[in-house]
Amino acid sequence: MRLQLIAAALAFAFTPRARADEPARSGTATLRVYADDDHVTVVSPTTTAVVPVTSDVVVDGEVAADAVTAASVDVITAASPGTVHELRIEAAAGVTDAVTHTAAIGARAIVSHEHDYDSVHGSAHGRVELADRNLTLDGVVDLGFEAASSVTDASFHAHRRTQRAIATFTQILDHRTYVDLIIDGERLYGYHASPYRTVPLVDAMEPIVTRVSEATPALRLQLAGALRVRRALTVRSALHAGYRLYFDDWGIVSHTATASLVADRHRARAGLGARFYAQSGASFYREAYALLPDGSVPALRTRDRTLGPMDTLALMLTGDLATTDRGDRGPRVIAELAAMEMWFFEFAPQRQRAAITTTVGVAAPF
Amino acid sequence: MAVARRLLASRPVRACWLVVLLLLATGCVRVRPYQRETLAQPIMQAPPWPALEPLDEHLFEVREGTGGATGAAGGGCGCN
């Protein structure tokens, strides 16, 4: 009798999905333009597609690019002053298999290429729904390899390896509320700096400022946890709010608070969101570095302003419109306008930076 | 290794584990499938606009010193 019960339980656990759950083919195409008052412009086209292969297996693909034109203060003070033009291309492909009605596994690969940088990441993910689908657990394990070179120094080659794990818990609290908890840990080992940035060193005895290359610790351990609440205010509106805490062994602690109000009416959906970010600086970050009393150079030094104390405030207005009466089963046009202000408290060349992004796109089944 | 042990034993990490345990404890709540009409609305999904989420996360990760805990693992970028 016990063997029969065990066999019945196994058969139930591994029952394949019914054909009625077969997902539809869909695709998106977006174009984002970023511009800031630091003379940086980025044009980013992206295309994605999701295609079901069988009733249980779905494959997805993405191609994205970043065309960067920069005359940033970071570039001007670096070894190669002047306007920089860069093109980054990224391609990703993934597969997901719904092994049962409540469990799925998958894998994904992402490759990225610039003329002085290449990266490859591979990940495996799994999802299981428990407690009558009131609780969803997602897990991702990602391994990455990144290689950097320099257009100004043909002999420069450096690399970095990454290992990352992400766990997401989503719980239905009541018939109007979701709560998500995300825990994300990453280990990065290798080269984290930039071959184009140099650090000015001040010597109290000499009027001349010398410049040396950056030097950061080889190992970086990061841990972040986020809590997010999604609550329906009415049948047609919802509030999304979240908080993220991050800290690492470089001494950086950051806090991120987000809130957005989303509503839909007839064929249109719109959302107004705000995001505030505050970060402390790395333990070795200095606004200005000086030679040590014995005349030696500080062992750890960086000119990366994003490793110093900084705040960010962003406001986003997003919307999409169904172009037919079929709602989400038909094409939708998407648009977003966002404004960002960044404050760098220990970076003399630029204390504030303002940016605007404009995004348009279309999502449609095919 | 000692640094990793210190990180894992720190107060923020212990707080995260407490929240996880509380979250799992709320698994006692049962919302039946026929009660989930509101939860199934597109405006309740995270994120509400999936096509824009990778772009937004990349935007912030490049211009800030930290990232993560968004639920997705992205690729690499030599954007420094």
Image (tube, coloured by chain):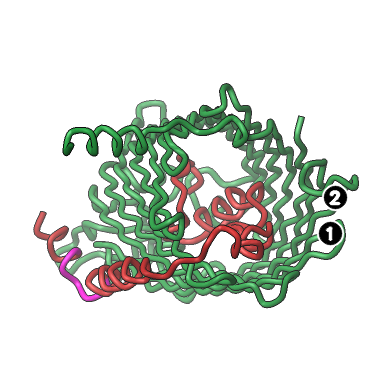
When the figure is inspected, residue A237 is found, relative to residue A121, above or below; the finding is below
Residue density around tag 1, few if under 14, some if 14–19, many if 20 or more, within 10 Å: some
Q: Colour of chain A?
A: green
The residue sitting at the top extreme is: A53
Total numbered badges shown on the rendered structure? 2
Of A277 and A141, nearer the camera is A141
Kind of element beneath mark 2: strand
For the residue marked with disc 1, what is the amino acid?
Ala
Q: Chain of mark 1?
A: A
Q: Give the crowd class for mark 2: few <14, some 14-19, many >=20 residues within 10 Å.
A: many
Q: Residue furthest front?
A: A1
Report the magenta residues as a range: B8-12
**Residue at disc 1, secondary structure:** strand
Question: To which residue does mark 1 refer?
Answer: A268
- Quadrant of the drawing holding the N terminus of chain A: top left
Q: The disc labelled 2 sits on which kind of residue?
A: Ala
Any idea which chain is the red one in this picture? B
Tell me if residue A319 can be seen. yes
Magenta residue check for B11: yes
Q: Are marks 2 and 1 in contact (CB under 8 Å)?
A: yes
Residue A24 lies left or right of residue B5; in this view the side is right
- Residue at the far right in the pictured view: A324
Q: Chain of mark 2?
A: A
Residue A76 percent coordinates (x, y):
57, 53
Residue in the picture at 62% in, 45% down: A82
Q: Which residue is mark 2?
A: A322
Q: Residue at x 42, y 54 (%)?
A: A136
